């Protein structure tokens, strides 16, 4: 569980950057990977995110938690990456996109009957597809909420949006996903 | 609210919207509760699947390493400054030494020429002149 730091304590912790890396690298990688669905690019952007954080650590004042601050850097990197290489991204995505089955296969719930397992896998696949088709800001908000389990205010801080805007994007995203799950287009 | 929640209201509820009237209906209506839970569960399972899948992918990634100090940031600027100072000092010294060497070579050449000019007998005739002198 992440420690929420006070403004006084935060710079002290960020001085030991190895701890920051140990605590947050996997989470940053997960968010970036879920956004861009390309392992190699996700690894590179995660490294870049940590490098930028390292260089800017002196300016971290603890207004947000280190996690939110790092996620803010990651969100901006993903946004730049998608904007600067949109064509390349989609061409590459066609060749090396993460296989849907690789996500739904990780649905581990021994409580479910075989039939329920199949249904649950189909639903996870539908959510994965729907999330991939969302506009960039909706997808970002959706993943921060339902994968990273961040609160609306944290998402607002990480994305630079107002809380009301976050709510609106989240509603649109959930509505799109619900329609996809229910087979409506 | 005496009616069931609309699909959009279910999405809004799952997205975090809380309206007292809808909450009152949800507390009493099993059908609407089930619809909300179904969507909630699908999203929770999606989040769980992404986490597990990502953890496997992360296991193969390279560890983060801070850049070498000699190649970045302050180190790079310091190295560049040192190189500039070395060049700034070395070039004039090299030029001075080179000029001194050239001057020395010129001086030696001048002395040789001077010696050649000041001979009483030209060099090719010197052996003959010596024989003549010894014959006296």
Image (cartoon, coloured by chain):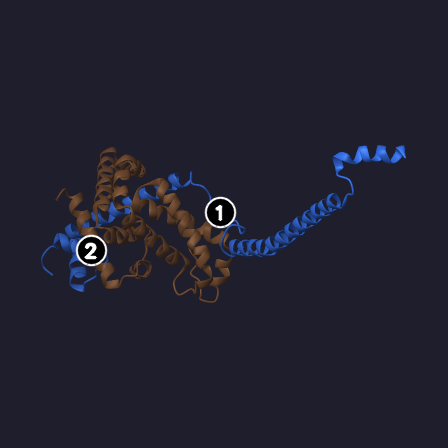
Q: Secondary structure at mark 1?
A: loop
Chain (blue): B
Quadrant where the image shows the N terminus of chain B = bottom left
Is B61 displayed left or right of A139 in the figure? right
Q: Is residue B27 visible?
A: yes
Judged from this view, the residue extending furthest toward the bottom is A8
State the CA–CA distance, disc 1 to disc 2.
39 Å
Disc 2 secondary structure class? helix
Q: Which chain is brown?
A: A
Chain letter of the residue beneath label 1 in the structure image: B
Q: Is residue B16 above or below residue B134?
A: below
User: Which residue is disc 1 drawn over?
Assistant: B65
Asked if marks 1 and 2 fall on the same chain, the answer is no
Viewer-closest of B19 and B43: B43
Q: Which mark is residue A171?
A: 2
Where does residue B44 sit, x and y in percent of width and height?
28, 47
Residue B106 disc label: none
Q: Quadrant of the C terminus of chain B?
A: top right
């Amino acid at each position: 569980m992440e420690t929420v730091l006070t403004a006084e304590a935060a710079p002290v912790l960020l001085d030991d950057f190895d701890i920051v890396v140990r605590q947050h690298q996997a989470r940053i990688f997960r968010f970036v990977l879920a956004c861009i669905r390309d392992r190699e690019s996700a690894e590179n952007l995660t490294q870049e995110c940590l490098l930028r954080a390292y260089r800017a650590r002196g300016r971290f004042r603890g207004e947000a938690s280190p996690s939110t601050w790092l996620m803010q850097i990651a969100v901006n990197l993903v946004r730049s990456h998608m904007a600067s290489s949109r064509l390349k991204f989609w061409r590459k995505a066609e060749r090396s996109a993460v296989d849907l089955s690789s996500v739904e296969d990780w649905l581990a719930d021994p409580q479910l009957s075989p039939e329920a397992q199949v249904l649950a896998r189909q639903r996870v696949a539908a959510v994965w597809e729907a999330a991939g088709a969302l506009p960039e800001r909706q997808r970002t908000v959706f993943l921060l909420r339902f994968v990273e389990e961040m609160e609306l205010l944290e998402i607002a801080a990480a994305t630079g949006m107002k809380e009301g805007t976050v709510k609106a994007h989240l509603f649109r995203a959930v509505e799109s996903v619900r329609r996809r799950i229910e087979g409506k287009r | 609210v005496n009616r069931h929640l609309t699909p959009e209201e279910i999405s809004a509820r799952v997205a975090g919207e809380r309206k007292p009237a809808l909450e009152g209906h949800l507390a009493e209506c099993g059908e609407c509760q089930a619809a909300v839970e179904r969507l909630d569960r699908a999203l929770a399972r999606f989040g769980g699947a992404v986490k597990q899948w990502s953890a496997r992918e992360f296991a193969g990634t390279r560890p983060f390493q801070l850049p070498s100090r000699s190649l970045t940031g302050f180190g790079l600027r310091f190295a560049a400054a040192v190189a500039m100072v070395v060049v700034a000092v070395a070039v004039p010294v090299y030029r001075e030494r080179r000029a001194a060497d050239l001057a020395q070579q010129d001086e030696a050449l001048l002395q040789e020429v001077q010696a050649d000019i000041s001979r009483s007998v030209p060099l090719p005739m010197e052996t003959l002149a010596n024989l003549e002198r010894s014959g006296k």
